[in-house]
Image: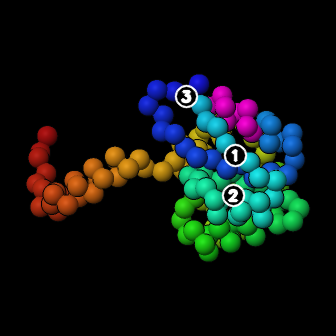
Amino acid sequence: MKEMGKMPLSILLVDDVELNRKVALLMLKKLGYRADFATNGFEAIEALEHESYDIVLMDIQMPVMDGLEATKIIRQRWHQNPKIIIVTGLTNCQDACLDAGADDFLNKPLGIEKLRAAIEYNMPISPFVSSNLEEFAATSNLCAMETIPI
């Protein structure tokens, strides 16, 4: 059940552990989202070649291709889109994740409020808001505006 006014997001969940995927998918459903999934970094890249995603929730330790390698390749091919949120149980690897090109980092165990906050923080600006901001910037001269004493 989607909340009123919530922008639909296209989410890809990447995790090789079936139980982790089921839990994350249930949390996303409770938050009003649905997601596709992949079981390793290679499958994630294949999915991105066929579908545009706003957010990728990426585990690090996976067979075939790990999350850091996949994140580097995604950044080389798609630059800043999609937003990549690393979700891992590993400690002391936040710098490596961000260096690989991740936008955000979540520690496991994953909680629904941490997941909600990360999605909202990394949510893309809607085209309506973006076009209105561009129009405002083009027609406004903020530097010339006077401050009004209160």
Q: Is residue 101 above or below residue 35?
A: below
Q: Does the magenta stretch include residue 140?
A: no
Q: Give the range drawn in magenta.
A: 24-31
Res. 105 in view: no
Sequence order check: which comes first, mark 3 or mark 1?
3
Instruction: Of the two numbered discs 2 and 3 on the same chain, state the one appearing first in sequence.
Output: 3
Q: What element carries label 2?
A: helix
- Measured from the top left, where is residue 30 in percent x and y? 66, 28
Residue 92 percent across, percent down from the top left: 78, 61
Q: Are marks 1 and 2 in contact (CB under 8 Å)?
A: yes
Q: Where is mark 3, residue-wise?
A: 2
Q: Distance between the residues labelled 2 and 3?
A: 24 Å
Q: Which amino acid does the dot numbered 2 rest on?
A: Ala
Q: Which of 117 and 82 is in front in this view?
A: 82
| Viewer can see residue 21 | yes
Q: Which residue position is annotated with label 1?
A: 36
Q: Between marks 1 and 2, how big is the CA–CA gap?
A: 9 Å
Q: Marks 2 and 3: CB-CB under 8 Å?
A: no
Neighbour class for label 1 at 10 Å: few (<14), some, many (≥20)?
some
Look at label 3 and name its amino acid: Lys
Q: Considering the numbered disc 1 on the image, is that residue within a helix, a strand or a loop?
A: strand
Horizontal arrangement in the rendering, residue 32 relative to residue 137 (left or right): right
Q: Quadrant of residue 120?
A: top right
